[in-house]
């Protein structure tokens, strides 16, 4: 009993830390990728953010691997089956590379909240498939899944409505600017037609300066 309680507490703490890290990463990425989030700061390219993230992840996972009990088992597996082990590492690295890079481009185009909602949607689909295969009949589990699905649907609906309102406001502003320009052009044209011919006035021409040199007669 005490051991199970300790394991449950540790698992709960790890879940909370994982949720906080999973929620914080898209926000930090959006701050680094999108312009206008912070003033006087040039946004980074997704490949640059991906490089920094990979370096941090490599150091953290290396420390975890050296300190965990999985180090011995992984080295033994690589020694016994080097071909399969290397193939697993390469396949996992390629999939992680594609996923992380596409995630950063997605965050740059949309927002951190959209990425989080999309990730939760994918997880819910996987949970539903797994629950259907395992024939899960727990009402609490299905109610939780239903709540998440409804929340994702509501977020998608309100986001779409907000985008429609922004587009309508932008179109109305553009139409107002066009009308103002047309009225200004019409007023200018009417003023040009009503004005009489310009009177030309002759200005006196300035005479070129001349030098008058008096003749000096010398008495011999």
Image: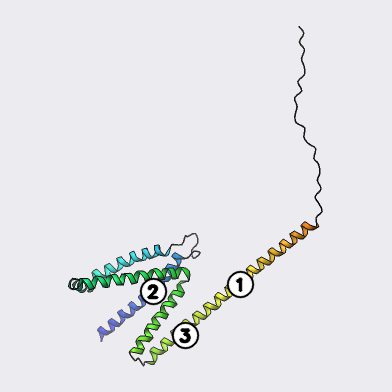
Q: Which residue is mark 1?
A: 169
Q: Find residue 22 and name its label.
A: 2
Q: Which residue is mark 3?
A: 150
Q: Is residue 220 above or below residue 25?
A: above
* Image location (x, y in percent) of residue 209: 75, 29
Q: Which residue sits at x=36%, y=66%?
A: 53
Q: Give whichever of discs 3 and 1 has the lower sequence position.
A: 3
Mark 3 packing: few (<14 Cα in 10 Å), some, or many (20+)? few
Does the CB distance between marks 3 and 2 fall below 8 Å? no
Q: Of circles 2 and 1, which is in front?
A: 1
Q: Of circles 3 and 2, which is in front?
A: 3
Q: Which residue sits at x=38%, y=76%?
A: 19
Q: Is residue 199 above or below residue 132?
A: above
Q: Quadrant of residue 213?
A: top right
Q: Which residue sits at x=33%, y=77%?
A: 14
Give the side of residue 4 with respect to residue 203, left or right.
left
Does the CB distance between marks 3 and 1 fall below 8 Å? no
**Label 3: which secondary element:** helix
């Amino acid at each position: 009993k005490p051991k199970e309680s300790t394991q449950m507490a540790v698992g709960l703490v790890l879940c909370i830390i994982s949720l906080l890290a999973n929620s914080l990463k898209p926000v930090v990425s959006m701050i680094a990728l999108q312009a206008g989030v912070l003033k006087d700061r040039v946004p980074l390219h997704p490949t640059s953010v991906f490089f920094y993230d990979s370096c941090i992840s490599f150091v953290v996972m290396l420390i975890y691997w050296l300190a965990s009990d999985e180090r011995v088992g992984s080295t033994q597996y690589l020694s016994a089956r080097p071909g399969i082990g290397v193939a697993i590492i390469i396949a996992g690295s390629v999939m992680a590379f594609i996923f992380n890079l596409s995630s950063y481009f997605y965050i740059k185009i949309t927002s951190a909240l959209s990425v989080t909602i999309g990730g939760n949607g994918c997880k819910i689909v996987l949970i539903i498939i797994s629950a259907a295969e395992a024939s899960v009949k727990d009402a609490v589990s299905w109610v939780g899944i239903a709540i998440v699905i409804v929340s994702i649907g509501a977020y998608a609906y309100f986001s779409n409505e907000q985008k429609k309102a922004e587009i309508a406001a932008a179109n109305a502003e553009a139409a107002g600017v066009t009308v103002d320009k047309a009225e200004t052009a019409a007023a200018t044209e009417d003023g040009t037609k009503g004005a009489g011919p310009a009177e030309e006035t002759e200005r006196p021409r300035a005479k070129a300066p001349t030098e008058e040199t008096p003749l000096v007669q010398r008495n011999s």
